[in-house]
Image (cartoon, rainbow, N blue to C red):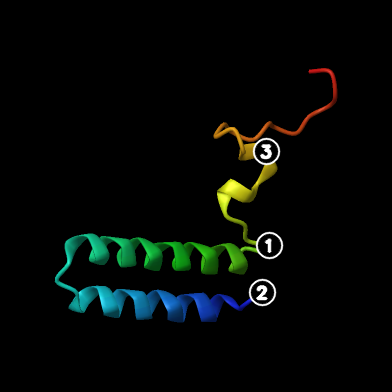
Amino acid sequence: MQSADYYRKQAVKAERLAFFLGDAQAKAELEKMAGDYRDIAIDLEDGAVEVRHPARMPQLKDGGQAEPDGPPGR
């Protein structure tokens, strides 16, 4: 896993590239990517051990919300 600083630098790179693009769709994608990189950096700083794409999280495979933790039988 990379450091939070790595993801912040990637966010800056994506924003710089987006600034110079004329294609609005590509620009929007790069700006979203920059935001995602920033979110990962924040998660790592807050103690996240692993960062996974939502589609790879078993509890979210159906597109639903994760089940809250609680005692069995609820």
First-in-chain label (3 vs 1)? 1
First-in-chain label (2 vs 3)? 2
Residue lying at 61% horizontally and 67% vertically, measured from the top left: 44
Q: CA distance from mark 1 to mark 2?
A: 8 Å
Residue lying at 19% horizontally and 74% vertically, measured from the top left: 21
Q: Answer yes or no: do the residues labelled 1 and 2 have beta carbons within 8 Å?
A: yes
Name the quadrant containing residue 9.
Answer: bottom left
Q: Which image quarter holds the C terminus?
A: top right
Mark 2 is on which residue type? Answer: Met
Give the structural element (helix, strand or loop) at label 2: loop
Residue lying at 65% horizontally and 46% vertically, measured from the top left: 57
Q: Nearer the viewer, mark 3 or mark 1?
A: 3
Q: Position of residue 37 (x, y in %)?
A: 46, 68
Name the quadrant containing residue 29.
Answer: bottom left
Q: Position of residue 66 (x, y in %)?
A: 64, 35
Tag on residue 50? 1
Q: Position of residue 51 (x, y in %)?
A: 62, 61
Give the structural element (helix, strand or loop) at label 3: helix
In this view, the residue farthest toward the top is 74
Provide the residue designation for mark 3: 59
